[in-house]
Image (cartoon, coloured by chain):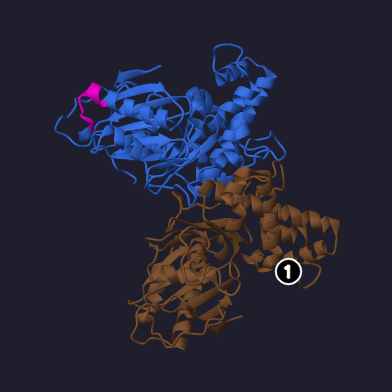
Chain colours: A brown, B blue
Amino acid sequence: MESTTLGGTTGVPAAPPDPRGPGWSVGVDVGGTKVLAALLDPAGRVARTHRAATRPGPDGLVDVVTTAVRTLTRAHGVPVERLAGTGVGVPGVVDPVTGTVEHAVNVGVAQPFALAAAVASVLGPAARVRVENDLNAAVLGAAHTVEPGATARDVAFLALGTGVAAGLLLDGTLRRGSHRAAGEVGHLTLVPGGLPCKCGQAGCIEQYASGSALDAAWPSPDARPAPVALLDAADAGDARAVAVRDRFVGAVAVAVRVLVLTCDVDRVVVGGGVSQLGTRLLDPLRAQLAREAAASPFLASLGVTDRVHLAPRDVPVAAVGAALVGRGEHV
Amino acid sequence: MESTTLGGTTGVPAAPPDPRGPGWSVGVDVGGTKVLAALLDPAGRVARTHRAATRPGPDGLVDVVTTAVRTLTRAHGVPVERLAGTGVGVPGVVDPVTGTVEHAVNVGVAQPFALAAAVASVLGPAARVRVENDLNAAVLGAAHTVEPGATARDVAFLALGTGVAAGLLLDGTLRRGSHRAAGEVGHLTLVPGGLPCKCGQAGCIEQYASGSALDAAWPSPDARPAPVALLDAADAGDARAVAVRDRFVGAVAVAVRVLVLTCDVDRVVVGGGVSQLGTRLLDPLRAQLAREAAASPFLASLGVTDRVHLAPRDVPVAAVGAALVGRGEHV
């Protein structure tokens, strides 16, 4: 599945390489199945992207990351040693100071692994490699891209994917958490005594708002992704599909409300696989939040409905955020 | 009810006044019924406290605050003009830069009111007056006092009083929120379709975890506060009291879990009137959290149970926090 695309996923024309220039960086977003990398120009625009399959385990991880960096920099004529840095976003517990990753079970890294050092040892002594949790990278990318020409300072990135969790940028600073566990809203209880969750609890938000939850509740009968099949069936009037959809939208709305009422984030950017639904998700989500606000002057005063946005579908926000980490922002 | 106490509420012997010294400050915590003020010495110890009844409205507010400051400073021989500053904590929406208060309905100030300027105009041109939201002041005071000899940097102060809400100190910085509304966990839904809340929603955490909720669910038959009467009845085996108590403890546990899972705060300090229950609240709360952790390796890994503490009963944490605000910390 490996592919490299010029200015690929943004629609922004590629800036010409600046052979003198510092300021270029590469970001690599490592997911459970795919790796998406972006070369960012000094102005913060995506110049080129690269996609490959994830290879689990420490060696596979280092190989796929370094291949992505070399591929992008060679293709664009920016030497690795001239990069401002390389950032890697990984779904696990990351120590951004040491560049060590652990509990990254989806990419086959359970024990602490010094990923930054391992990548740097392959790329060469001049490489500046930084590692960050993938949702922290994603919220930086979302803040960088959600408003054209400006960087938002107060954002939650709510990822609806295999699980449900958020990255938090508060007052311009990443909120990693005292135990690097901030944003675990997916494991708050939505339905007491509800569906069992792999975390050991029951009725977690994640069991109703994640992509996995939709896969389980409405297996796609054909090539369409489960969320699309579900919404198609609901639109066609299938009562059971309507119930599953409404429960899903209600669960996402609860996650949004938790983020807004607890952290008072200015924006909640919904991302992750399910966000590919676009307005088919955003419109009913906003309608749900508007109904709640209509019943509650308190919620209305907070303007929850207007705080919700979708991650841009044409920008790899997590890779962009990793590239911002790579060039030393938000250390 | 006016009274002034030497080293009053802390048990710490009063430090001798330092007539040369900068660094002394006064903090005034304005509540719906009472005002509690503290004179803090340069080492951050409570030298003297003062208590008075709240007088609603802008004029009453200014009068009671300035009287508290003058009473404490005169009694201790520290001239007002030598104070490092005066801080005022108010239950409302506060602009800490301008010192303006609004939506402070419990103290009779609805429209924007320039409280800092009004207090300074009475105390004199040398007075440095700063205003902060009362829960923000309280979390600073809690961080200052929860561990003897050290200041915690990552704390939520969960107030169980008339309502339920939290102040947040994250990575050493107050999280006021993008709309100065962070910490409103009391209005997250605990029981769908449950007890109506004045916010317009139903089943809010506040309807089960607040002091007002206990007053309503278990009106005291005598002079004991409602929470005490409830626990006494539960201890005596009253099945209905046991049910109300368990629902109360469960609701507080949910608020704690929301704060830990969303913000990953290192400590949750439970305060407010209900926290006067002391270990009669803390023990069942920790037991509830421990039961939840026993069922969930995820919750166990977060160590939620060990993060919960009670506000010290012998320190006026909100007044202490206001005094820290007054001397210019956390601007």
Q: Establish if A278 lies above or below B55.
A: below
Q: Establish if A145 lies above or below B263.
A: below
Give the magenta part as a residue range: B73-80
Residue at the extreme left: B20
Q: Secondary structure at mark 1?
A: loop
Depth order, front residue of A297/A304: A297
Depth order, front residue of B107/A13: B107
Depth order, front residue of A229/A117: A229
Q: Residue at x 62, y 25 (%)?
A: B245
Disc 1 chain ID: A
Can residue A328 be seen here? The reply is yes
Residue B230: x percent and y percent? 60, 19
The answer to if B77 sits in the magenta stretch is yes
Residue A116: x percent and y percent? 41, 68
The answer to if B297 sits in the magenta stretch is no
Q: Establish if B280 lies above or below A293.
A: above
